[in-house]
Amino acid sequence: MRKGKLLKYAELATFGNVFQIPLHQIEQAPFSLKSRWAPDFFKNEKPITLELGCGKGEYTLALAEKFPQENFIGVDIKGARLWRGSKTALEKKINNVAFIRTNIENLVNVFSIGEISEIWLTFPDPQPQKSREKKRLTSPRFLDMFRSLLTPMGRIHLKTDNKSLFEYSLESVRKSGGTILFHTFDLYNERMDDDILSVKTYYEGMFLEEGLKICYMKFVLNGPDGGIK
């Protein structure tokens, strides 16, 4: 197992659609593609969507294939996971997708203000202990960071099977001055026209097979009710 991971890490370093950005590197100087992702990497001016905690990247890839008119970037700290998604993208020649290996906290050094159009939070760690509240991706500190990265009216999507995290997130968004555009505690029993929700993660499929309900919300932080801070 260890040897297999080392081989994946070695191969990952050769992939042109993967950027491994350690904290010490961007503390010394801004990342080279900051503010230039669309024109310099994707070679276009299309909007960029992030999936945070993308794992093996199947959701990022599915979005990229479904919406070829947009750019997609999956972010995760686990290199072995990113290897699978980035390799699949290269094999299938999906050119509107990239992957970043870094901590989510580092994104302010990777992207400029207003550079991102949309963010997906797909089944993030609920961090249930009160002492770990600041690590929840919908805590005030992360919402403030997302606000700075997003364009005006840039949307954030959250999917989770954890009802407690979902309830916390609803309250956190409201307290942060955001606007909740839609929310449901049982996504797949809702009648919706938004076909973007037909895309499912691997774990989401497992949860549904187990009979678990999927909570979903869509919200903005930079809008008429949630001004840019």
Image (cartoon, grey):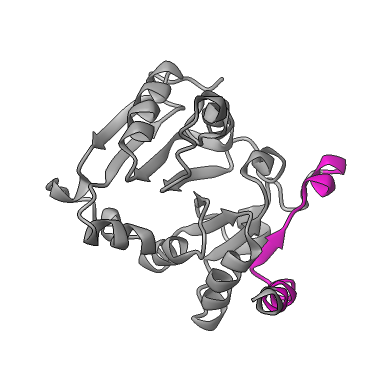
Quadrant housing residue 153: top left
> Does the image show residue 158?
yes
**Image position of 186 with respect to 142: above or below:** below
Residue at image coords 87%, 42%: 28
- Which span is picked out in magenta? 6-29
Residue visible at 52% across and 24% down in the picture: 140
Query: Which percent across, then down, holds residue 42?
Result: 60, 63
On whether residue 28 falls in the magenta region, the answer is yes
Residue positioned 30% across, 36% down in the render: 163
* Rendered position, 178 above or below 61: above
118 over 222 or under it: above or below: below
Position of the N terminus, as image quadrant, is bottom right
Q: In which quarter of the image is the C terminus?
A: top right
Q: What is the total number of numbered labels drawn onto the structure image?
A: 0
Of residues 117 and 62, which is closer to you in this image?
62
Q: Position of residue 216 (x, y in %)?
A: 29, 42
Please check the rendered image and state whether residue 69 is part of the magenta-colored stretch, yes or no: no
Residue at screen point 53% across, 74% down: 89
- Residue 10 x, y percent position in the rendering: 75, 76
Query: Do we see residue 43 in this rendering?
Result: no
